[in-house]
Image: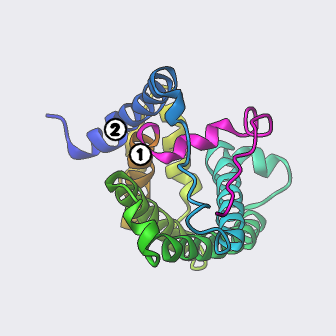
Amino acid sequence: MFSLNEFLYAALPYISLTVLVGGTIIRYAQGERGWTTKSSEFLSKQDLKIAGPMFHLGLFMAFGGHVIGVLIPKFVTEAAGIDEHLYHFIALAGGIPAGVLFVLGFIMLMIRRFGNDKMAVNTSSLDRVLYLVLAVTIITGCLGTLSGLTGHFNYRDTISPWFRSILMLSPDISYMEDVPLVFRIHMAMWMLTAILFPFSRLVHCLSFPFEYFCRSNIIYRRK
């Protein structure tokens, strides 16, 4: 009998990664003209100058922290002279500022998006679903980071080896048996984000840095 845990932590990761890669390739091949973030600067520009960079800086910092914390095994950092206490301190020192930037930037973008009637009207149903998923992902990620203040749970002994076992095509769901709920929700959200990725505005990030600096600027003129 296929259990829920087997589906969530052995099957769903491969389903989401397959949709992510395959769906992205198909979208680019069949709908390259729709490969965009659907710029809304012509509707509202001033309030994007702070919110946009703040959100993306927080995103890059959080992504870097995830790469280090999930993909790099514990024994590697220990061999480099970084013990558990020091790693814990570095993770919080980088994770908390990243979370603050990420959350504040996201809130400002959502206020911009739904506090303006013109912006709200030009927001698709898929965008609304995406924003909800991103909100839950960010909130659970921040709660997970803050839970590190207590030191009762170490994701590098559970989630990290589980994720690496997925990449090695040998999923070991036993690592996820005692993982707290907030981290389980966070795992489910990244898989859902991967599934939504090829069909949403998120694909625009793959244009950076290859085509982004080469394309012509889009110029909007006032009447």
Kindly identify which residue carries mark 1: 191
Q: Residues within 10 Å of mark 1 (few under 14, many from 20)?
A: many
Q: Which residue is mark 2?
A: 12
Looking at this view, is 4 or 178 the one in front?
4
Quadrant into which the C terminus falls: bottom right
Question: Mark 1 belongs to which amino acid?
Answer: Met
Instruction: Tell me if residue 54 is in the magenta stretch.
Output: no
Q: Nearer the viewer, residue 197 or 169?
A: 197
Place residue 146 in its image quadrant.
Answer: bottom right
Name the one closer to the observer, 110 or 165. Answer: 110
Mark 1 or mark 2: name the one nearer the start of the chain: 2
The N terminus - image quarter: top left
What residue do we see at 54% from left, 58% from top? 155
Q: How far across and down, in percent of the image, does residue 142 sit?
A: 54, 71
> Who's the residue at 52% across and 46% down the image?
202
Taking 114 as reference, is 39 left or right? right
Q: Which residue, as the protein is rendered here, is positioned at the far top?
A: 29
Q: What secondary structure characterizes most of the magenta part?
A: loop
Q: Does the rendering let one see residue 151?
A: no
Amino acid at the residue labelled 2: Leu
What is the secondary structure assignment of the residue under circle 2?
A: helix
Question: Which region shows up in magenta?
Answer: 198-223
